[in-house]
Image: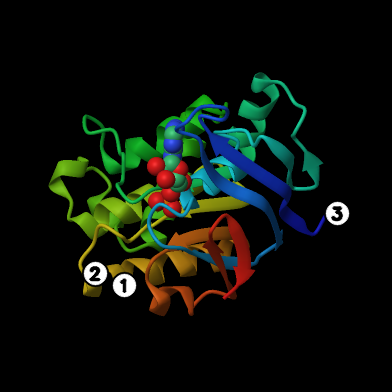
Amino acid sequence: MNDVALRLTGITKTYNAGTPGAVTVLRGVDVRLAKGEIVALVAPSGAGKSTLLHIAGLLDTPDTGTVEIGGQDVTGQSDRQRTVVRRDQVGFVYQFHHLLPEFSASENIVLPQLAAGRSRQQAQDRATELLESVGVGARAHHRPAELSGGEQQRVAFCRALANRPSLLLADEPTGNLDPATSDTVFDALMTLVRTTGLSALIATHNMDLARRMDRQLRLDEGSLTSA
Ligand code: ADP
């Protein structure tokens, strides 16, 4: 069994390379996340957090360097293979919930499971279990617009975990909430991650939240250091 959930080695990324507008965002970044580890990615806005998370989650490709997820080197894989790895192994959470507005909280968690081949009953049971674990079980049949910001984000966490990924990538997951709500919603996320044994890389500006994770990495000037 492989005990490394995510390994990035020598990642570089330049946007608009070879043009006057070239922006070098990553200059040789190495990351190693052990199974079950929760790591904060701290950086000022524009430093390249989203770029790094998108590369780690196979939504973007680096110029050079390798990406391994669950011990599997996906660097040279086809788009199709990468899509399968992403679907089965990676959960994403963003600053905004991006729930489908016309579906209930529960349905938003059921749909990705149906897409991955699970039966409706299995998917519904999983959605109920997840929603209850983050304290929004009673809101399962409400649409996103009928939920508070904190509730919407809890549902987004459940959706990210619906297909039992091994890796969670989160980009400012509580950045859109007021400080008190952010705190309790962050607690819900940490509990969910710990109880499922997931590995997580969580970008945040908030040092108080960062300190509650196992360790902190700082991204600055294209390089990553321990914070
Ligand atoms: P962060 O998430 O830390 O705010 P990003 O990864 O979004 O940072 O962006 C890092 C830098 O790369 C910024 O200067 C941004 O303007 C630039 N950038 C991001 N995406 C693109 C793109 N598709 N094309 C050109 N520049 C980009």
Q: Residue at (51%, 27%) from the top-left corner?
A: 19
Query: Which of the two discs, 3 and 1, labels the residue nearer the N terminus?
Result: 3
Please, what is the three-letter code of the amino acid marked with disc 1?
Thr
Local packing at callout 3 (Cα closer than 10 Å; few below 14, some 14-19, many 20+) is few
Q: Secondary structure at mark 3?
A: loop
Confirm or deny contact between disc 1 and disc 2 (CB under 8 A).
Answer: yes
Q: Is 124 drawn above or below residue 76 in the view shown?
A: below
Please, what is the three-letter code of the amino acid marked with disc 3?
Met
For marks 3 and 1, give the CA distance: 34 Å
The residue under label 2 is: 181
Q: Residue at (65%, 44%) from the top-left corner?
A: 12
The residue under label 1 is: 184
For marks 1 and 2, give the CA distance: 5 Å
Q: Is 220 positioned to the left or the right of 80 in the image? A: left
Q: Residue at (18%, 51%) from the top-left corner?
A: 147
Q: Residue at (66%, 65%) from the top-left corner?
A: 36
- Quarter of the figure with residue 57: top right
Location of ligand 1 given as a quarter of the image: top left
* Quadrant of image for the N terminus: bottom right
Please, what is the three-letter code of the amino acid marked with disc 2?
Thr
Please indicate, yes or no, whether residue 72 appears anywhere in the rendered image.
Answer: yes
Local packing at callout 2 (Cα closer than 10 Å; few below 14, some 14-19, many 20+) is some
The residue under label 3 is: 1
Please indicate, yes or no, whether residue 142 appears anywhere in the rendered image.
Answer: no
